[in-house]
Amino acid sequence: MSPRLSNMISASEALALLREGNQRFVAHQSEAVATMNPARRTELVAGQAPFAIVLGCSDSRVPAELVFDQGLGDLFVIRVAGNIVAPSQIGSVEFAAERFGTRLVVVMGHSQCGAVMATLEVVLGNATTESRNLKSIVDLVRPSIEEMLEDREETDPDVLIHEAVRANVRASVNHLRHGSELLEELIQKDGLLIVGAEYSLESGIVTFFDGVPESAKEPE
Ligand SMILES: [Zn+2]
């Protein structure tokens, strides 16, 4: 299941591994825990070669390793409320992509995201944030939600939250794709793929967004 340390796999292969892992998770057939033995731990002391980078939300219900059924050393995970992209998140992605040669980056939002819902309330004028630090998260989520709300008659809160989660993921993907010269170069010349995804708390299923190139949908 885990790729070999010395040979970094392509983005499309990595995507296939994540899809398969999520299918096992949903089917309650997870295997990764069985590979987390002392031997594997010892093997990884010498170095890591995570096959995918996941930028996800800190929400306790969305641990990337579990929902993709992966073990020690498999995923380089960055978690922050609202899966926002600030300089330290870009730096973390750059670090893994350059240092380990990891070629797939997944920005994973999720249904009922508290950070997105809080931002939506602020944008709709139903709440304010008092903490400057919390506000820094809301301010990063806010532009994509404001854009999403433009020219929209929709008032069903469930629909709005769903759309807002997706808009926020797309904004983070765009930010990563265009907010770093290093990542831009890796995308153009070295097969780096940055994709959006949404995890459903209800079903456990991770849906990868459109825009995943056809060539990346199946293993080569
Ligand atoms: Zn969240």
Image (cartoon, rainbow, N blue to C red):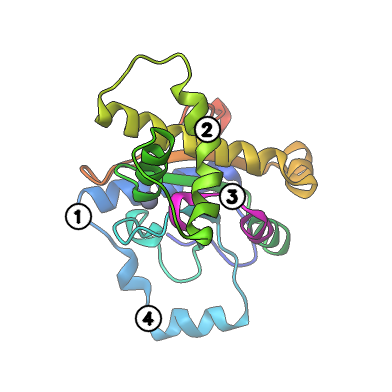
Residue under label 4, please give it. 37
Q: Is residue 47 visible to us here? A: yes
- From the viewer's perspective, is residue 106 above or below residue 210? below
> What's the distance in space between the residues labelled 3 and 1, CA to CA?
32 Å
**Residue type at mark 1?**
His
The disc at residue 28 is 1
Look at 71% across and 64% down and name the residue there. Answer: 99
- What kind of element bears circle 4? loop
Q: Position of residue 128 (x, y in %)?
A: 41, 47
Nearer to me, 220 or 31: 31
Q: Which mark is residue 144?
A: 2
Q: Is mark 2 within 8 Å of ligand 1?
A: no
Q: Nearer the viewer, residue 217 or 144?
A: 144
Q: CA distance from mark 1 to mark 2?
A: 35 Å
Give the magenta-colored segment's residue range.
80-92
Label 1 element class = loop
Residue 9 drawn at (x, y percent): 60, 52
Name which quarter of the figure residue 95 lies in.
bottom right
Task: Identify the mark nearer the N-term, 4 or 1.
Answer: 1
- Amino acid type assigned to the residue bearing label 2 in the image: Ser
Between 116 and 15, the one lying in front of the other is: 116
Q: Does ligand 1 reach within 8 Å of label 1's beta carbon?
A: no
Residue 208 shows in the view: no
